[in-house]
Image (cartoon, helix red, strand yellow):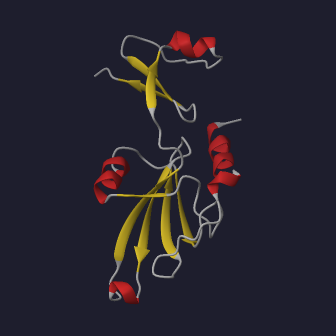
């Protein structure tokens, strides 16, 4: 399966939610954290939703209105979102709030040999290649730290 098909399939998984449902792992983050993550990586997909509940059925209305949301999806199934809150309680002024979704990765460095032993085949190797595996979801991230 080519990379584009894999990514499209990921966005259609049940944990991705649907048009009015937040993706799994929905959590509010600070503006600083949003900026640090958003400007470090390029999203693979952008989506618009009017969210009213989380994937497990919890209401996530703000000021009793749907969340007018822009979601930015990344290749690893995580993402960031901006919500425009515009209501009587905000004085009808636009208020932007920031969210993350998907796994909140906790990476640990692994050697290529360790990953191969477990059936995870790594193509890139070398002195400046570092492999990290999320201890929560198993996602593997490889970084070339050479100049």
Q: Quadrant of residue 80?
A: bottom left
Q: Nearer the viewer, residue 139 or 88?
A: 88
What residue is shown at x 62% (from left), y 70% (from top)?
Answer: 20
Q: Which residue appears farthest toward the front when viewing the image?
A: 58
Quadrant of residue 136 within the rendered picture: top right
In the rendered image, which quarter contains the N terminus? top right
**41 is higher (above) or lower (below) than 67:** above
Residue 30 at x, y percent in the picture? 33, 58
The answer to whether 52 appears left or right of 97 in the picture is right
Residue at 59% of width from left, 63% of height from top? 54
Query: Can residue 30 be seen from the camera position used here?
Result: yes
- The residue located at (39%, 90%) in the rendering is 88
Q: Say left or right for 14 vs 90.
A: right
The percent coordinates of residue 91 (x first, y second) are: 32, 88
Question: In the rendering, at what x and y percent does residue 142 appear?
Answer: 46, 26
Q: Quadrant of residue 96?
A: bottom left
Q: Is residue 12 visible?
A: no
In percent of width and height, residue 62 lies at 47, 76
Q: How many marks?
A: 0
Which residue is pictured at 63% across the width and 68% down the height?
19
Most foreground residue, 46 or 95: 95
Is 7 rendered above or below residue 60? above
- Quarter placement of the C terminus: top left
């Amino acid at each position: 399966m080519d990379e584009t098909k894999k990514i499209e399939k990921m966005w259609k998984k049940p944990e991705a939610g649907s048009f009015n449902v937040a993706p799994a792992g929905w959590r509010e983050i600070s503006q600083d954290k949003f900026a640090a993550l958003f400007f470090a990586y390029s999203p693979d997909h952008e989506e618009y939703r009017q969210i009213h509940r989380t994937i497990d059925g919890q209401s996530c209305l703000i000021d009793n209105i749907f969340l007018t949301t822009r979601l930015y999806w990344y290749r690893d199934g995580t993402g960031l979102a901006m919500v425009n809150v515009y209501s009587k309680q905000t004085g009808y002024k636009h208020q932007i709030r920031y969210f993350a979704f998907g796994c909140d990765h906790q990476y640990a460095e692994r050697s290529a040999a360790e990953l191969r032993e477990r059936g995870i085949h790594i193509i890139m190797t070398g002195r400046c290649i570092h492999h990290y595996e999320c201890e929560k979801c198993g996602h593997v991230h490889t970084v070339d730290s050479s100049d």
